[in-house]
Amino acid sequence: MDIKEYIKNNKIIFDGGMGTYFAEKFRDYSGTCEYANLDHPEYIEEIHREYLRAGCNAVKTNTFSSNPVNYAEDNKRLQDIINAACDIAKSAAASVCGSEEQENGRQAFIFADIGPIIGADREQASIAYRRTADIFLLNDIGNFLFETNSSDTGILETAEYIKSKRADVFIIVSFAVQPDGYTREGLYFADVLKRMKESRYIDAVGMNCVCGAFHMNRVLSVIDISDIYFSVMPNAGYPRVVGSRTFYDSDPEFFAEQMVRMAEQGAVFLGGCCGTRPNYIRELAEKISGNDAGKKVVYRSGEGYNADAGQREKEVAAQADGVKESLSEDNRLWNKLSAGKKVIAVELDPPRQADGTKFMSGAWSLKAAGADAITIADCATARASIDSSIMACKLRRELDIDTVPHMTCRDRNLNATKALLLGLSMEGVRNVLTVTGDPVPSAERNEVKSVYQFNSRMLAGFVKSLNENEIEKPFRIYGALNVNAAKFEYQLKFAKEKEENGISGFLTQPILTEAALENLKTARRSVNGKILGGIIPVVSSRNARFMNSEISGITVDEKIVELYEGKSRDECTELAVNISTKIARLIAPYVDGYYLITPFSRTDIISQIIKNIRQELID
């Protein structure tokens, strides 16, 4: 029977967590779960049969990690594993359920199981997905499940490709959504769901993994699934680790009760992910078959849609619109930029010790000189200093000056980043600079671990999503723009992607060469956001040569270096002020403000430059 015909009047119950159940059941097997398709196909078929006997009527092929990226382009190995997985799943379904032609035979659908392509860009992911899909199509598999995705990179293109090869294929795309409604890459699921709904190549959307059934039910209750088939496959609660082994020990009955609630909300496909053994699926199948509401199938009609949830979604959207309208009321820095006033933001590195007296004194002198905002680096060069967000809040409270804390992707996962942003919002900080962050020095990598759960563009997109859905008074998001890059066209490409992810303005690297100035002019013509031109005073010839050799993203013109040769400290200070003021004058037509970087905490130099800029260019 065609799957679309079947689900007009029936729910589909998937199997459970193949990988976790395999690891639990066959502990002596040393290979990967997918390799068992070749080494011990009887192991995999035995598990398929257990789930089918428990009551599922849809089986996922044992191919979650089988793609060209994970198999290092070993195409023969990839084909052999997928071919074997398809044969095993078909054999198990036939042995337990029989064929449609047999009397009393029950339907069992086979789904090609395709996990996420990690670390690839859109084109690379699409190519890898397509090559994987081609093998399934050659095996006459007519249903596809793209599961555990943290983004939709390459998915829509692949779905279109598959449909061009075989129009009757049924495609489910499922995302790993955390209890707060975000994926691990910081995408708000309601936004991703909207994109999936808009595609004519996606037949169903869903959530799987990460959440237990209770929290997945809560996420489902606040989104609108009235106009698309929906799939839910939660974990068996949350894992605990004993020794080196991971256990899921939640209650199968509680799991099934939550699944029935999701069925009542309109979910059509129901199953399990990590930790869900056959007894979970048995409990689910029994409760669904005995529950009238659970049988109700909702698709593109609105029937069964949670009206309260829809109303909440509308209220959230209206609130987001209202927040955007009132944005300028609570952000003094952005107020000035929006009014066309040139602003001065100064970067001041936080102290590496617990004493912040010198930092606060320096910040006070910068405000007195006329700085509009203080930007604060986030553990520059990947070495620990007082947290930039804590210092931003302290400056805001004690000096009443706007702050722009830098926020890197290096040291925090998604949860820690969200927690920090919520705290910043509560403290009245309204601007953040999202940057990838310097890597941890190689000598320290065995002791200090980087996180890098996402890049700066993804981080900006996450902040944007929080602005639209959770934060009452949202942030203005800024990004870095390296005008010293050898291939500046790539920087412009990244800048446009950053703007798509919610960035409103850019702080450039220091402009100390003609090439950097030309790149700045190009940027002015190319980006929509506000631009704050970077200026760093050179304090000596040694300082200049150090920056050229050791600091990524800074290039000092050799002519400038020569000016400092043989000069005294006082003469170098005077040169630093004069050259920086001249640079401010040169870049004035192409910037919306200035981003001054304080060298060696020399706020005396920066204060004089601020005064010069205000006298000559602003006031």
Image (cartoon, grey):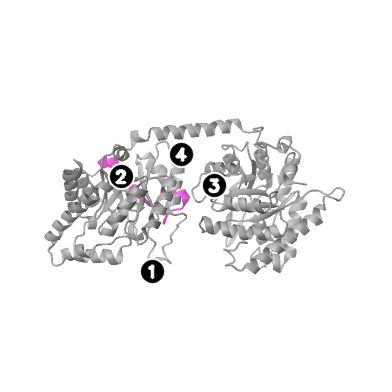
Using the image, determine if residue 100 lies above or below residue 62. above
383 drawn magenta? no
* Segment tinted magenta in the rendering: 395-419
Of circles 4 and 2, which is in front? Answer: 4
Q: Residue 468 carries which label?
A: 4
Local secondary structure at mark 3: loop
Q: Is residue 476 visible?
A: yes
Using the image, determine if residue 284 lies above or below residue 129. above
Q: Which residue is drawn at 57% across and 62% down?
A: 243
> Which amino acid, mark 1?
Ala
Q: Can residue 470 be seen in this view?
A: no
Of circles 2 and 1, which is in front? Answer: 2
Q: Please give the residue where the numbered disc 2 appears in the rendered image.
A: 403
Give the CA separation, mark 4 to mark 1.
41 Å
> Which amino acid, mark 2?
Thr
Disc 3 residue crowd, few under 14, some 14–19, many 20+, Cα 10 Å: many
Q: Which mark is residue 178?
A: 3
Give the CA separation, mark 2 to mark 1.
33 Å
> Which amino acid, mark 4?
Glu
Q: Please give left or right for residue 88 compared with residue 267 in the image.
A: right
Give the CA separation, mark 2 to mark 3.
31 Å
Tell me where residue 493 appears, x and y as whole percent. Answer: 41, 53
- What is the quadrant of residue 334 in the picture? top left
Q: Residue 443 carries which label?
A: 1
Local secondary structure at mark 2: strand
Mark 4 or mark 2, earlier in chain:
2
Disc 1 residue crowd, few under 14, some 14–19, many 20+, Cα 10 Å: few
Disc 2 residue crowd, few under 14, some 14–19, many 20+, Cα 10 Å: many
Mark 3 or mark 4, earlier in chain:
3
Tell me where residue 515 appears, x and y as whole percent. Answer: 29, 59
Name the residue nearer the viewer: 318 or 514.
514
